[in-house]
Amino acid sequence: MSLPQFKLLRLRTVEDAVSALARHAGVGARATRIVAGGTDLIPSMQQKLFEPEYVLDVRHIAELKGIRETAEGVEIGALTSLTAIEQSPLLRRHYLVLTEAAGTVASPVLRNMGTIGGNICLDTRCLWYNQSLTWRKGCGFCIKKDGDLCHVAPGGTKCWAVFSADTPPALLCLDAEVEIASASGTRRIPLADFYTGEGDDYRKLHPDELLTRVFVPRSSANYRAVYRKLRVRGSIDYPLAAVAVALKRVNGHIADAHLAITAVNPAPMLVKGVSELLSGKALDESLADAAGDLAAKTARPLTTSALTPEYRREMIRVFTKRAVLAAADVQ
Ligand SMILES: Cc1cc2nc3c(=O)[nH]c(=O)nc-3n(C[C@H](O)[C@H](O)[C@H](O)COP(=O)(O)OP(=O)(O)OC[C@H]3O[C@@H](n4cnc5c(N)ncnc54)[C@H](O)[C@@H]3O)c2cc1C
Ligand code: SF4
């Protein structure tokens, strides 16, 4: 499959990148696209899901690469590769849930190319959307691109395409924030506020904005952590349901717990009420079951992906129970 025609702008500083975005942001299908590792953008352009007039290559912006310890915690440049995150001794020591999740993305080659910024900004996915132009045309297109109906939930007006990146649920468990830059300055927001929950317009990022950094606070360091992921091919595949757990144990009791899920909703979701459920208690099977029930209630899988919604929701329940027990060392 060939790429559509576009003009490539190669930038070397954030300042140049945001001023190029201000000049060429564009709108709709022709809006400018940022390319970082390109592991998702390029295949999507080949399928004509994006047909931008300009592509902004930010791969050479050195100031956005690397992991740095700060007084507040850790700062990760948006262009840091997933391999660098997976292998970082600092992150492995203090933020294990993130390195575990990063280590499950795609394959080693794709993790060398793929960036944390690209993973956070990853487009939502659907069986009716991630297809060639000819295939989508044969089905009459859909709301997410070129059409006005949804094949997954016919009759509705909402797109349910599923958010399928691995690191965001880990980052949600760590209370991470993201920095977003534009020509008018920078803003910093909790990652939890970055996603909209809509499958088509899934992130709060204006066409003239660049995600520049991720911040993980010191208060989230040293939690026990587990990441569990369901996928068809263990060696290289998007999650079809996945669970990130980070918890703190003091004197055999849970002191704090965070649980997030991905690949079962149009956004990665923090499961509410988990800390209240587990805190102050010694974890046992029935508490872990209750955490699994909470997670399964938060999951709203539909027929967007290879496995059935019922199975994916059930696996959220099962993985949550196992992950919570493993993180608390009860097994
Ligand atoms: C076979 C295969 C398997 C895969 N398996 C997985 C998997 O298991 N788990 C998973 O999470 N992903 C998977 N992916 C998707 C992808 O490889 C990763 O999500 C990767 O982290 C994307 O990062 P990237 O830098 O390559 O993003 P790109 O492809 O460069 O960009 C992805 C999107 O983010 C936007 N973007 C990138 N950087 C920025 C920025 N700094 N600011 C604003 N917007 C930005 C781009 O415009 C684009 O919309 C898979 C891909 C393939 C081809
Ligand atoms: S959920 Fe519906 S509108 Fe969204 S991509 Fe799938 S078929 Fe299209």
Image (cartoon, rainbow, N blue to C red):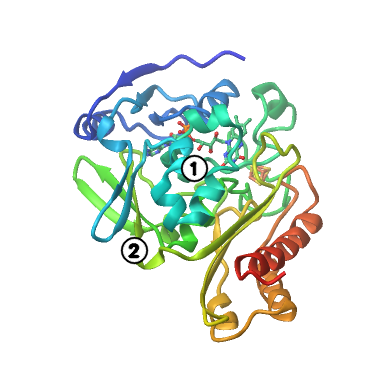
* Residue 204 visible (yes or no): no
Q: Is residue 23 left or right of residue 206?
A: left
The residue sitting at 23% across, 49% down in the picture is 186
For marks 2 and 1, the one nearer the N-term is 1
The residue sitting at 39% across, 34% down in the picture is 27
Q: Position of residue 88 (x, y in %)?
A: 42, 43
Query: Crowding at label 1, few (<14), some or many (≥20) Cα neighbours within 10 Å?
Result: many
Query: Crowding at label 2, few (<14), some or many (≥20) Cα neighbours within 10 Å?
Result: some
What amino acid is labelled 1 in the image?
Answer: Glu
Q: Position of residue 324 (x, y in %)?
A: 64, 68
Instruction: Locate the C terminus by quadrant.
Output: bottom right
Q: Position of residue 192 (x, y in %)?
A: 44, 61
What amino acid is labelled 2 in the image?
Answer: Arg
Label 2 and label 1: CA atoms lie apart by 19 Å
Instruction: Locate the N terminus by quadrant.
Output: top right
| 2 and 1 marks in contact (CB < 8 Å) | no
Mark number, residue 86: 1
Q: Is residue 60 left or right of residue 288?
A: left
Name the residue at the front extreme.
251
Q: Is residue 299 above or below residue 34?
A: below
The residue sitting at 72% across, 39% down in the picture is 234
Say which residue label 2 marks.
Answer: 218
Mark number, residue 2: none
Secondary structure beneath label 1: helix
* Residue 58 visible (yes or no): yes
Q: Position of residue 151 (x, y in %)?
A: 73, 44
